């Protein structure tokens, strides 16, 4: 049974936590453990739909990175993707920036620490730039997408755009790809999604 308790939607196996930005959720899964280890569901279509998260995922991705690697802030221009992200090993700080036209939180961001220990997930809807920085020595990061990757459609905004003002954790040296070093600011890109 769906129970609403303030910012929480408790589905038994999942706890859907609303953030300050509409449509972005932190998701906690119930882990069942014993002396062998643990088991948990990370996605259940019926439970997600009951919580209002109605997505059809078509692609799963996984990456491995070392401390200080920052991937982002990425989006696809013509084929925006919703992403359900989690960490399999290690710890990352994950960020979503609202780029939806007419959104009252346009240009605002929300972040969450994801780790193998807290087992949290982050639901990033379409119309957002997304990125993360690795906080631990290494991290394995996995995510589901509701649209296929189109390399010709890549876009991004500067990870440290002062107008967006993401408060990244101090991880020492930031390591960026060549592509991520050259993203424009949000005001330069003028990107707005109709979703």
Image (cartoon, rainbow, N blue to C red):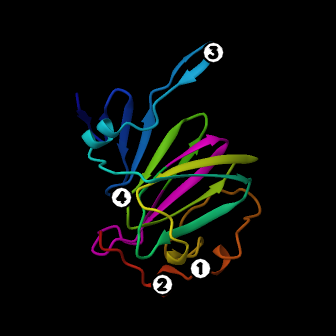
**Which of the marked residues, 2 or 4, is nearer the chain's N terminus?**
4
Residue at the spot of label 3: 36
The outermost residue toward the bottom is 188
Residue at the spot of label 2: 189
Residue at the spot of label 4: 21
Residue at the spot of label 1: 183
**Which of the marked residues, 2 or 1, is nearer the chain's N terminus?**
1
Q: CA distance from mark 2 to mark 1?
A: 9 Å
Tell which tag, 4 or 1, sits nearer the viewer. 1
Residue 115 at x, y percent in the picture: 60, 41
**Res. 175 image quadrant:** bottom right
Contact between marks 2 and 1 (CB within 8 A): the answer is: yes
**Res. 194 image quadrant:** bottom left
Q: Is 103 one of the magenta-colored residues?
A: yes
- In the rendered view, tell whether residue 12 sits above or below residue 49: above
Circle 1 Cα neighbour tier, 10 Å, few/some/many (<14 / 14–19 / ≥20): some
**Which of the marked residues, 4 or 3, is nearer the chain's N terminus?**
4
Residue 133 has which mark? Answer: none
Residue 34 at x, y percent in the picture: 57, 14
Contact between marks 3 and 2 (CB within 8 A): the answer is: no
Q: Residue at x 63, y 12 (%)?
A: 35
The outermost residue toward the top is 35
Q: CA distance from mark 1 to mark 3?
A: 46 Å
- Span highlighted in magenta in the image: 85-110
Q: Residue at x 23, y 32 (%)?
A: 2
Contact between marks 4 and 3 (CB within 8 A): the answer is: no
Is residue 64 visible in the rendered structure shown here? yes
The secondary element bearing badge 1 is classed as loop
């Amino acid at each position: 049974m769906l129970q609403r308790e303030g910012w929480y939607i408790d589905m038994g196996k999942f706890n859907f936590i609303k953030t300050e930005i509409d449509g972005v959720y932190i998701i906690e899964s119930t882990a069942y453990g014993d002396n062998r280890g643990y088991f948990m569901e990370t996605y259940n279509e019926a439970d997600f739909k009951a919580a209002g998260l109605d997505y059809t995922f078509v692609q799963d991705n996984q990456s491995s990175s070392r401390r200080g690697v920052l991937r982002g802030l990425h989006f696809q221009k013509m084929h925006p993707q919703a992403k359900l992200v989690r960490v399999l090993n290690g710890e990352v700080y994950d960020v979503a920036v609202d780029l939806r036209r007419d959104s009252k939180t346009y240009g605002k961001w929300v972040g969450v620490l994801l780790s193998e220990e807290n087992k949290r997930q982050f639901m990033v809807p379409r119309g957002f730039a997304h990125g993360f920085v690795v906080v631990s020595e290494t991290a394995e990061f996995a995510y589901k997408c509701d649209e296929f990757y189109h390399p010709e459609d890549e876009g991004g905004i500067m990870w440290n755009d002062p107008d967006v003002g993401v408060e990244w954790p101090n991880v020492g040296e930031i390591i960026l790809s060549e592509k991520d070093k050259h993203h424009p600011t949000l005001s330069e890109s003028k990107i707005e999604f109709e979703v």
